[in-house]
Image (tube, rainbow, N blue to C red):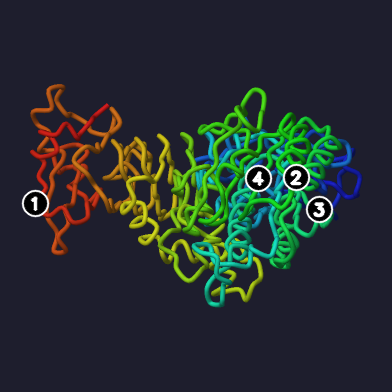
Amino acid sequence: SIAAQGNNDNDPSTPEDTGLDLVAGSITVDIVETGMITGTTTDVAPNSNVVLTITGFDENGEEIEIERTVQTDSSGNYQYQIIPADGIATGTDGSTVWVVANSTDNNRNNINAQDSEAVDPVIKGDTSTGITNGDNSVTGTSGDDLLTGDIGGLKTNFIAGNNYNISIILDVSGSMGRNLYDESTAVPPALSRLDIAKAGLKAFVEQMLQHDGTIIFRLTTFSGSGNTIGYTEFEVNQSNKATIFAQIDGLVAGGGTYPGDAFTNANTWFTSKQNGYENQTYYLTDGDPNESLASMDTKFQPLAAQSKVFAVGVSNAVNIANVERYDNTDVNGNKVDTWNGVSNHGTAQKFTEADKLIAYLIGGSENFIPADVGADTVKGGAGDDVLFGDAMNTDWITGLDPLQYPQYSGYSKLIAHLKATETGGAEPTQQQIYDFVKANYRDFIAADAADPATKGGNDTIYGGSGDDIIIAGAGNDIIYGGSGNDIISTGRGDDTIMYDVLNAADAKGGNGTDTWVDYEANDKIEFAADFFDGLLADKSNIGDYITVVTDGNGNAVIQVDRDGSAVTHTMSDLLIVENQAGLSLQDLIDNNQLVIG
């Protein structure tokens, strides 16, 4: 007789038990968002190999596949943790990872299973992602991302990363109900001095929300006959924004001008805040005080000792000498050594134009000045991404109060616009933000181009796979479009678009056909050293490898033949240069705009 070879029981320790095999081999596999892979087997001997084929994306969004072999334990279980050295971006970055598990059961049959873990794409670039105006490194996901290298906004008296106690001392006396430019009572729709101060404070809070440190905000109001003091305190964050705005909106004008007790109140608060934060006070008033200067000096002295105090005159009629007497900062915002109301005090200004008053309150200048930005690295990864090297320029957006959302408001203005036009006042979703920016990307580009004061860092941007929109902004930027058909705006500066070999078998090296919307003669196109095969060292045969033609839409099209022979490869469209009909290869050569290696 002939005995069948196999396993006639469920005990994995007896794989050679003869008889009819009653157990079918099987395997399971599961992967979770942290990159941990686990599985079980049935009818597989202990210490059997399980081959895991893992497919995902690297940090630049290019697909990558690896194999890892693990062994089953005595119970038929196995596990593997994807680690950074594997080169696959996993988990909370939003990548999708696929895994196939293969093994052999006791009958020598192949068994396999597969699983994937898809984490919802994260659309970045808002204040919750930790983006600052410094030198950031931002990496996208395998989804459709919105990434910004900088948060933008206005220049303020804040230093990036520092924490602040901010005291606002606001005059709400009866005269604050008058016009800014004269002593007549403001009649709607004209704005009163208090209306303008309230709009300015809300604009200031919007800028505080974009600061990357902690800000404790205290609003102290004064009027009456010396004892009418109101105050409220909040940490400035998105959760408290509506409450802070409600407190500001609720202010009304009435009574006399007695600032002294408000100075004392602010000083007492700073004394209680022994948190190591920098203290700053903003003093806004529209008239000469009813209180004696001697009394005010006595009450201001201890405040001046422990806080910078920036004073602003909120009318044309105010005696500026009595405003700057209670300022202890110089023209650069530095605190004077020892305050003296008569001979050693700061500088202040009075205003008859609302926007200049608000600009001075926020940044110490009559003009709105954009915040400085950093040199950033932005990596889109997979997906159709929208990537900003610097901050979004939202100045083209209309319909919002220009006092609360002045020039260079940046991201906060975008959110306010979406709340007003699309979400009914609710916070917009990340998808809504992405969709709006993608649909209107040319308006963001045009706003940057129209304003030479816009700040830009020297950024490096990687599009990755997918059809991306890349808006580098000002600065000397380096752009790697990647494998998709990208739209690229390099903005002002000496910029370079880079082409590496992503796929050696492809006519364009694995790159897509990109569109450059704002080419300038100071920009460059750089190819990797191995991009062309057979190009002479002196580049004398470069015409065999690169040509420039004009399409029917007024654009130049840069074409490449990677082997220069039209044998393995032929001329293929690599880069469309918008509105540059007539641009020639010789132009690029003469301007030193082609770099190889």
Q: Nearer the viewer, residue 301 or 158?
A: 301
Residue at mark 3 to residue at mark 4: CA–CA distance: 19 Å
Dot 2: what SS? strand
Residue 143 lies, in percent from the top left, at 55, 55
**Of callouts 2 and 3, the N-terminal one:** 2
- Name the disc covering residue 282, or none: 4
Work out whether mark 3 precedes mark 4 in sequence or the reverse, and give the earlier one.
Answer: 3
Q: Disc 1 designates what residue?
A: 582
CA gap, disc 3 to disc 1?
75 Å
Q: Amino acid at mark 2?
A: Ile
Q: Name the residue rendered at 58%, 34% in the picture.
A: 346
**SS label for mark 4:** strand
- Comparing 88 with 115, the one in front is 88
Mark closer to the chain start, 2 or 4 = 2
Q: CA distance from mark 1 to mark 2?
A: 58 Å
Instruction: Tell whether 136 sits left or right of 563.
Output: right
Which residue type does callout 3 highlight? Gly
Q: Position of residue 391 (x, y in %)?
A: 47, 48
Q: Quadrant of residue 496?
A: top left
Q: Residue 252 shows which numbered tag?
A: none
Judged left or right of residue 591, residue 246 is right
Q: Say what amino acid the circle numbered 1 marks.
A: Gly
Q: Label 3: state its secondary structure.
A: loop
Which of disc 1 and disc 3 is earlier in sequence? Answer: 3
Gap between marks 1 and 4, in whole Å? 57 Å
